[in-house]
Amino acid sequence: MSTHDNEAADRARRLQRVAELLAEAVTPQEVLDAILTEGVRAAEARAGAIGVLSEDGTSIELLAERGYDATAMSGWTAFPVDAELPMSEVVRTGEPVFIASLQERNRDYPALAHQAQDAHALVVVPLTVEGRVFGAMSLSFDEDIEFDSERREMKIALARQAAQALARSRLYAAEQTMRERMTFLAEASELLGSSLDYNRTLRQVAQLSVPGLADWCAIDMVGPNGEIERLAVAHQDPEKVSWAYELQEMYPPDPDAPTGVPQVLRSGEPEFFPYFPQEVLDEAIGDDEELREIVDQLGLKSSITVPLIARNRTLGVLTLIAAEQHPPYTETDFELAIELGRHAAIAVDNARLFREAERGANAARALAYVADGVVLLDATGHVRHWNPAAAAITGVSEEDAIGCPVGDVVPAWDALTSHVPLLAPGSAPRPVTVPLVLGGHERWVAVSGVEFGQGTVYALQDVTEEHALEKTRSDFVATASHELRTPLAAVYGAVRTLRREDVELSDDDRTQFLEMIESEATRLARIVDQILLAGQLDAGAIEVELADCNPVEVASRVIESAEMHLPENISLGLEADEARTISCDENKLRQVLVNLVDNAVKYSPDGGRVDLHVRNGNGACVIDVIDQGLGIPPSERERIFEKFYRLDPQQTHGVGGSGLGLYICRELVERMNGLLSVESEPGNGSRFTLELPVRS
Amino acid sequence: MPGDPQSRGKASSRFAAGTARRVLVADDERAIRLLCRVNLAASGMDVLEAGDGREALELARKERPDLVLLDVMMPEVDGWTVARELAKDEQTRDIPIVFLTARAEAADKRLGEQLGGVGYLVKPFDPVTIGDFVENVLGRIERGEREQLRRGISSSPER
């Protein structure tokens, strides 16, 4: 065998050896190691390097080198694809370059003229897969070599092997990365969906991101007032995390910052810095030397900031930073981050929606038991909430009300609410009481309204009873003052007239005025007494003291005292069964009987008999007061027991009445567990019947 | 209180005019009627008395007084109804009505104004000046101020 044949066989063996090693190499790093050790040795070169086209195709990144001087290689990690350099040219043309000597190199590539001057032959061959150049391999030799075709072929064959192995391993790595990312996304999504406590899950996601996806991961949320709130910072080193929080305290985010979290929050657009531009850092640092030191210490390389957007609202921002360990970010990382941001935003939104719905459900549950009617109208006046109390007050069920224009639900709604001032949330309610006629019944409703962003909420309170009570009270005052005004007018008027000096009054007039003063003053005193008594009865302040008492004795005394000032045309009589002891308040019983007898006399203007009958009834003592006077029309028989009701006052001249007598009688009798009723025929007198329980 | 106590000296000026004013006093309280009668007579006026609303209507239609002093709370027919009835009848619609009542609330005064009253006196009132008051009202009506009188009712001070 010739030397030439030996050499050829030797090269084939070396190539075979490289091929075997490359076949075993799985990861790009293993492939690069194999090429740069066995490959370089097989090519009989001193050193080797492998560069690949960047993703955007504008530069060549040096993936690995072996055998070069460290200082010579500094500054060569990446260089433009259009540079006048051998590797750039090879990548551009797809053709290998063989340089025999330093002179040739410096002649053909002046850019390298000032580079290492101890170099000799240099070979750069393209790395091609499926006809596409994706990088180049350079080999440097210890001596000047004029490469013959066989040696050239050998280098090209080596490059082909390397290219295939590298492409395969890169594909594998990419798949691996993709799988890892998918796994990461799946894990993150599962985490996000696992709980409604999105603050906690977002923190877990941040934690999950380091160190696989980032050296630093931060999540900032938009607070209720639009402020930026840092929710999570993750780094493998907990000390660095607390340091980051301190930094945040010292350098709070400027909401108008042109880059970073504030910018992404404002614009809703993601931000991606594959390499942190120094200008951006300088801009952020300014003249703050301390901050510059911190930033230098951080060693920021590359960052991705994505908005968390759900339903067109930016809820927060996710920031990934590659610093001391993680390689600079690629487009794929950017896409992954956007995807992660989307998942996180949906999870946050869902959690918030769920909480809102839950709050709504709780509110509805609470409102179901509130006694006040609560009505929520949206901005278009449609009913959105109608609680059971609102249904009870309006008589319209929730089902019939929800979703309908409120004017259709309650036709009187406008009238009901037109005088109700709509208040701003938080102001003290000022309910307005208005009548509401529903199904022929008038109800009084206190309505207050609060207007907020999305509609109006009304509170309705059924105050029909309170209103009736209030009306009774104000009627009482009005009637009482009215009752006082007439006798006052008489007394005051009589005195004023008597004191006139310009008019000579007749003796008869003078006497009448004096009598008038006396009788009207008495009437006033009596009205005042009765008003006080009625007021006390209303307030429940009258105590009845039940004791044994003989009704016949009480009746006799009432007759005796009545006879003292009886009109001449009236005669009084008492008929009594054998007395039975009853249980009552003797003073009150006497008061009632005096009043009934007075009334009987008063309403007998034409004279006649007034009789008292005391009978023993069924377990009761029955006292009748019977007259032969005017009688009471049927329609008036119950009304006479009402407060301030006076039957035909024309007949009461000189006697005067407060309109309270019978009201007071009935109240007193009922407090003594008795009954007071009346029978009458107009023109044929009346019979008032008092029944009191016999002592058991 | 209506009128001005100092002006009482003019009370009898009506005598000189020759034709005495005729005033119908409608009140179920005898005391009030007596007060009005004595004091109006002192001002030289003729006084007609009605003890309830029905009587008041009858007398007003029959006698056509120059003015009615009308109580509101009366048996049979109340004062509001009397005012309405008088306004319906062409013969009586121009008779000026001065309400004389214990009802002091604003709503009552508004009703009095709506029913065409030209005055509203709340009890207790000063009967000594009632003659001057009536004379003043009638004088103003003669001067064409009836509408102003009517409108003045609900703006008169609360008693």
Image (cartoon, rainbow, N blue to C red):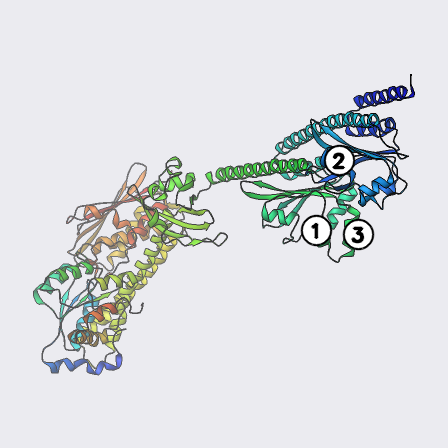
Query: Chain letter of disc 2?
Result: A
Asked if A230 appears above or below A62 in the picture, the reply is below
Q: How crowded is mark 2: few (under 14 residues within 10 Å), some or many (20 or more)?
A: many
- Quadrant where the C terminus of chain A is found in the figure: top left
Query: Of marks 3 and 2, which one's residue comes earlier in the chain?
Result: 2
Residue B112, horizontal then vertical, whole percent? 23, 63
Number of the front mark, 1 or 3: 1
Q: Mark 3 points at which residue?
A: A293
Q: Residues within 10 Å of mark 1 (few under 14, many from 20)?
A: few
Element class at badge 3: helix
- Mark 1: which amino acid? Val
Residue A485, horizontal then vertical, whole percent? 29, 65
Quadrant in the rendering for residue B22: bottom left
**Alpha carbon of mark 2 to alpha carbon of mark 1: how far?**
35 Å
Query: Of marks 2 and 1, which one's residue comes earlier in the chain?
Result: 2
Number of the front mark, 3 or 2: 2
**Badges 1 and 3, same chain:** yes
Query: Of marks 1 and 3, which one's residue comes earlier in the chain?
Result: 1
Quadrant in the rendering for residue B49: bottom left
Quadrant in the rendering for residue A494: bottom left
**Alpha carbon of mark 1 to alpha carbon of mark 3: how far?**
15 Å
Residue B159, horizontal then vertical, whole percent? 31, 68
Q: Mark 1 points at which residue?
A: A280
Any mark on residue A222, and which? none
Q: Mark 2 points at which residue?
A: A90
Element class at badge 1: helix
Can residue A327 be seen in the rendering of this structure? Answer: no
- Quadrant where the N terminus of chain A is found in the figure: top right
Q: Tell whether A674 sits left or right of A190.
A: left
- Mark 2: which amino acid? Val
Residue B2, horizontal then vertical, whole percent? 25, 74
